[in-house]
Amino acid sequence: GQQVQQSPSSLVLQEGENAELQCNFSSTATQLQWFYQSPGGSLVSLLSNPSGTKHTGRLTSTTVTKERRSSLHISSSQTTDSGTYLCAREQGTGSKLSFGKGAKLTVSP
Amino acid sequence: EAAVTQSPRNKVAVTGGKVTLSCNQTNNHNNMYWYRQDTGHGLRLIHYSYGAGSTEKGDIPDGYKASRPSQENFSLILELATPSQTSVYFCASGRTSSQNTLYFGAGTRLSVL
């Protein structure tokens, strides 16, 4: 079954609103990352957060390891935030990441 | 800035033909990975490597081979391409530690007709 589940699968916001993306994983993760993928583009790592809370710019990630969940909060969304956000956890050993299907965010002006 | 370069960026192949996708990284990372991305499936791991001469099977290796002749280069080989292998393929590199960040290439869009 799917080891990493993301919700919602899509989200539409007005510029300035906040976004909350969720990630649930099937077993304890030693590595948990959030990636951004621009429309038709490649993936860029946003945050690596295996536990606790981390901030970078307008992004905040909170991972509760024993509950096997992580969230990504985007504050004051901008149209340039539009794209797909993927959650990934380390799969077993060897630094292999297993990805969720992604959450498509659309921010309208 | 870490750099991962994939070639070609787009490829049209015929069923039964051989396809080679190439990936080059200038980060001196030990680990390299090949993923494919399909609507409804997300990113799925095909093959990966821990260093020159090493290749390991990922979650969906059937129909694919991989080659890591050097630290910098990692190829994905489709010996007999099938239409089901039409997809977008991403190469990535990363360090050995479990806290490593992956750096992705721009992707290769492959169509098998």
Image (cartoon, coloured by chain):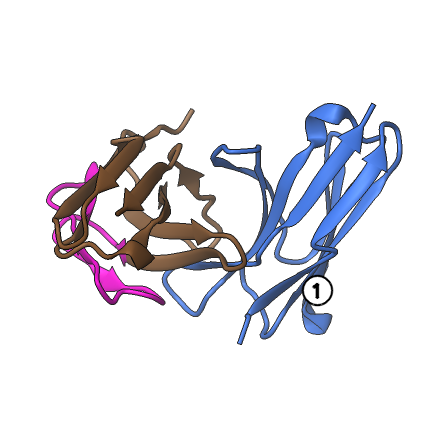
Chain colours: A blue, B brown
In terms of image quadrants, where is residue A93?
Answer: bottom left
Q: Which secondary structure, mark 1?
A: strand
In terms of image quadrants, where is residue B110?
Answer: top left
Q: Position of residue A99 (x, y in %)?
A: 52, 57
Q: Position of residue A40 (x, y in %)?
A: 51, 33
Examine the rendering and report whether any part of residue B62 can be seen. yes
- The N terminus of chain B: image quadrant: top left
Residue bearing mark 1: A69
The amino acid type of the residue labelled 1 equals Arg
**Residue depicted at x 12% and y 55%:** B79
Camera-side residue: B56 or B111? Answer: B111
Classify mark 1: residues with Cα within 10 Å, few (<14), some (14-19) or many (20+): many
Q: Main secondary structure of the magenta part?
A: loop
**Residue depicted at x 57% and y 56%:** A101
Camera-side residue: B70 or B84? Answer: B84
**Residue depicted at x 17% and y 50%:** B77
The vertical placement of B39 against A40, above or below, is below
- Residue B104 lies in the magenta stretch: no
**Residue depicted at x 74% and y 29%:** A57
Residue A107 left/right relative to A46:
right
Camera-side residue: B89 or A22? Answer: B89
Q: Which residues are magenta?
A: B48-76
In terms of image quadrants, where is residue B104?
Answer: top left
Q: Position of residue B51 (x, y in %)?
A: 21, 50
